[in-house]
Image: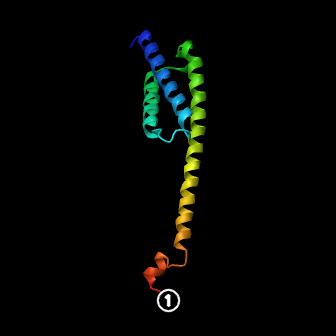
């Protein structure tokens, strides 16, 4: 593959990746209809393409025009990881609240599943 083609592909993949990350960062935790799974699949595909395009390149071989864009994308990925981690923490908290509520309902004076299996013994 010639240099011009590689440069064009790099520019295209980096641009697409940056757009996906920007969209994901703006919608995580704000848009209940956001399809995180699909977004993550698109992001993963771009990262894979980027890895394949640069696998035989040394960092110093990367065209200088892409160095700043790569830094920008890396920073956005760090922010993306932070937002995803926060989202997962929030989901874990909600799941724990639901578990606690179910456990509390089960302990409302009726028999627990284990007590029921073993038979009631006053």
Give the labeled residue for mark 1: 121
Residue 115 percent across, percent down from the top left: 48, 81
The residue positioned 55% from the left and 50% from the top of the image is: 91
Q: Secondary structure at mark 1?
A: loop
- Figure check: 96 above or below 104: above
At horizontal 57% and vertical 19% (from top left) the residue drawn is 69
In the image, 101 versus 66, the foreground residue is: 101
Q: How many marks?
A: 1
Q: Quadrant of residue 96?
A: bottom right
Question: Where the N terminus falls, by quadrant?
Answer: top left
The image position of residue 34, as x and y in percent, is 48, 38
Q: Quadrant of residue 49?
A: top left
Residue 18 placement, left or right of 2: right
Where residue 53 sits in the image (x, y, percent)? 44, 22
Q: Residue furthest bottom?
A: 122
> Which residue does the image show at 49% across and 79% down from the upper left?
111
Residue 93 pos. (x, y %): 58, 54
Q: Quadrant of residue 82?
A: top right
């Amino acid at each position: 593959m010639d240099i011009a083609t590689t440069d064009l592909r790099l520019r295209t993949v980096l641009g697409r990746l940056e757009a996906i990350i920007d969209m994901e960062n703006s919608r995580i935790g704000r848009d209940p209809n956001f399809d995180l799974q699909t977004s993550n699949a698109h992001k993963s595909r771009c990262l894979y393409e980027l890895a394949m395009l640069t696998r035989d390149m040394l960092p110093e071989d990367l065209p200088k025009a892409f160095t700043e864009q790569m830094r920008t994308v890396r920073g956005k990925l760090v922010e993306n990881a932070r937002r995803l981690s926060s989202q997962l923490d929030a989901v874990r908290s909600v799941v724990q609240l639901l578990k606690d509520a179910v456990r509390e309902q089960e302990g409302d004076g009726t028999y627990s599943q284990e007590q029921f299996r073993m038979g009631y013994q006053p």
